[in-house]
Amino acid sequence: MASPKKFRAKLWLWIVLLVIVASTAAKVGPTALAPQKLSDFTTPTPIPEADTLIIGFLGGWEKWDEPKRGVRKFALRLRAKNLPGVHIETVENHRREIAVELVKKSFDRNGDGTLSEEEAGSVRVILFGQSFGGAAVNKLCKELKPLGVPVLLAVQIDSVGVDDAEVPSNVRRAANFFQRDDYFFIRGERELRAEDAARTKILGNYKYNYRGKKVDLSDGRWYQKIFRNAHVKIEQDPDVWAKVAELILAEIRK
């Protein structure tokens, strides 16, 4: 059972988060918070054989096209490389169902509305996400497993969720980026473990330290600039995203 001190710290954290969500919703209004739709994706479906679909999940309650968030910025930089045979989309972490639909439509090459065993086995998908988006990556992998869909690479960045440490056996390779500097705020999942080590390779659990490390937070929201905590810094850390890019590009080239 958590100590009273830890309980109070967690309580204050959730109060702060609720205030942030409420103030953000009040500012942007209901239109900006409209749910993401399949029509928002630019990937033409189905995609050609041997092409790769990359899906990034944003953290918090951020919209899929928020250009200043770490996940979206990274996705746009990848798109700018014009990688042949690579399609890149971003999804809100609470909209995993449309990510599943995107995967189905991308690889349903006979157009019958379902993935055959052959179509499912041909799926080339890479997932990455930060914060609640990291947890969404893990959950989506688990949702794709009963469909027979393999995941080439799953990357979780300071993942915040429940039961997001165990990587399901349909994932071939996985990587974890995290920090443990924050006490009063959010700390990422410390260590990923494979459900089946014979089928999943954990490429690494990469720990980053932010005590005293300066990270440009000019793209952050007002509350992120005030708190400047490690969970905020890891999202905007160019060193983290450089390593994520290295892993994804290596996977694409295989």
Image (cartoon, rainbow, N blue to C red):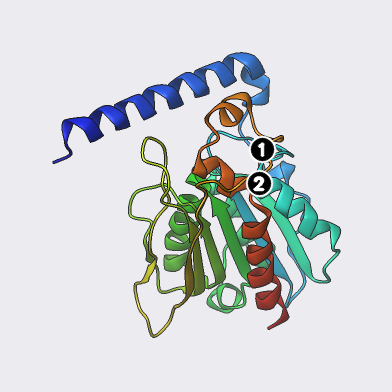
| Residue at the (38%, 22%) spot, across then down | 15
- Kind of residue at disc 1: Leu
Q: CA distance from mark 2 to mark 1?
A: 11 Å
- The location of residue 171, given as percent across then percent down, is 48, 72
- The location of residue 57, given as percent across then percent down, is 58, 49
Mark 2 residue crowding within 10 angstroms, few (<14) / some (14–19) / many (20+): many
Mark 1 residue crowding within 10 angstroms, few (<14) / some (14–19) / many (20+): some
Could you tell me if the residues under marks 2 and 1 are in contact, i.e. CB atoms within 8 Å? Answer: no
- The location of residue 125, given as percent across then percent down, is 62, 67
- The location of residue 175, given as percent across then percent down, is 51, 68
| Residue at the (44%, 78%) spot, across then down | 200
Q: Is residue 8 visible?
A: yes
The circle on residue 203 is: none
Q: Quadrant of the C terminus?
A: bottom right
Residue farthest toward the left in the current orientation of the protein: 1
> Which SS class for mark 2?
helix
Marked residue nearer the N-terminal end (2 or 1): 2
Q: Is residue 44 visible?
A: no
Q: In front here: 195 or 216?
A: 216
Q: Residue 113 appears in which quarter of the rendering? A: bottom right
Q: Is residue 254 above or below residue 42?
A: below
Q: Is residue 70 above or below residue 174?
A: above
Q: Which residue is mark 2?
A: 70
Q: Which residue is mark 1?
A: 217
The reply, left or right, for residue 68 in relation to residue 185 is: right
> Which SS class for mark 1?
loop
Q: Residue 1 appears in which quarter of the rendering? A: top left
- Kind of residue at disc 2: Gly
| Residue at the (62%, 24%) spot, across then down | 222
Q: In front here: 83 or 186?
A: 186
Residue farthest toward the top in the current orientation of the protein: 26
| Residue at the (58%, 31%) spot, across then down | 224
